[in-house]
Image (tube, grey):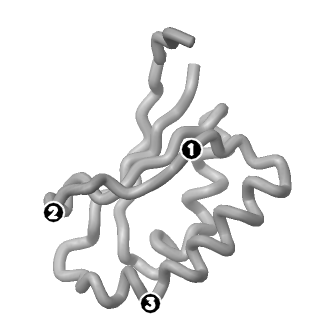
Amino acid sequence: MEFVVLYSLTEGVERSRLLETYPRHKAYFEAFRAAGGGLIALGPFQTTDPAGGSMGIFSSREDAERFIAGDPFTVEGLAVPRILEWNAVRFD
């Protein structure tokens, strides 16, 4: 079982704020992963729909919650997270 964090953009947030915050977000997710956090993948959706801003995949709910708690996108109020359990079917 994996856990997906879906980020929706906070209403009224301008793209310029996301771009300004992105370097801190990137440093955070790189450090989180390097420290052994269960981050499997993350990234933005290629859509203009604010409800589908981005997502991350985590190996545990605890890692997903810990990630959200310190991510500059959530700490600075730019995104609203939602955690979903994901029972992925793999074809590798």
**Label 3 secondary element:** helix
Quadrant position of the N terminus in the picture: top right
Nearer the N terminus, badge 1 or badge 3? 3
Amino acid of disc 2: Thr
> Which residue in the protein does label 2 denote?
48
- Please name the residue shown 71% across and 63% down the image: 30
Displayed quadrant of residue 16 = bottom left
Say what secondary structure mark 2 lies in.
loop
Mark 3 is surrounded, within 10 Å at the Cα level, by few (under 14), some (14 to 19) or many (20 or more) other residues, namely few
Foreground residue, 13 or 75?
13
Label 2 CA crowd tier, 10 Å (few <14, some 14–19, many 20+): few
Residue 22 locus on image (x, y percent):
49, 79
**28 shown above or below 84:** below
Mark 2 / mark 1, whichever is N-terminal: 1
Distance CA(mark 2)–CA(mark 3) = 18 Å
Q: Which residue is mark 3?
A: 20
x%, y% of residue 9?
28, 67
Between marks 1 and 3, how big is the CA–CA gap? 22 Å
Establish if 44 lies above or below 37.
Answer: below
Q: Earlier in the sequence, mark 2 or mark 3?
A: 3
Instruction: Say whether marks 1 and 3 touch (CB < 8 Å).
Output: no
Within-10-Å neighbours for mark 1: few <14, some 14–19, many 20+: few
What is the three-letter code of the residue carrying label 1? Ala
Residue 24 percent coordinates (x, y): 60, 81
Q: Residue at x 45, y 54 (%)?
A: 43
Secondary structure of residue under mark 1:
strand
Where residue 83 appears, x then y in whole percent? 44, 41
Residue 72, label in figure: none
From what the image shows, is residue 31 above or below residue 5? below
Type of amino acid under label 3: Glu
Residue at point 42% right, 33% down?
84
The residue that mark 1 highlights is 41
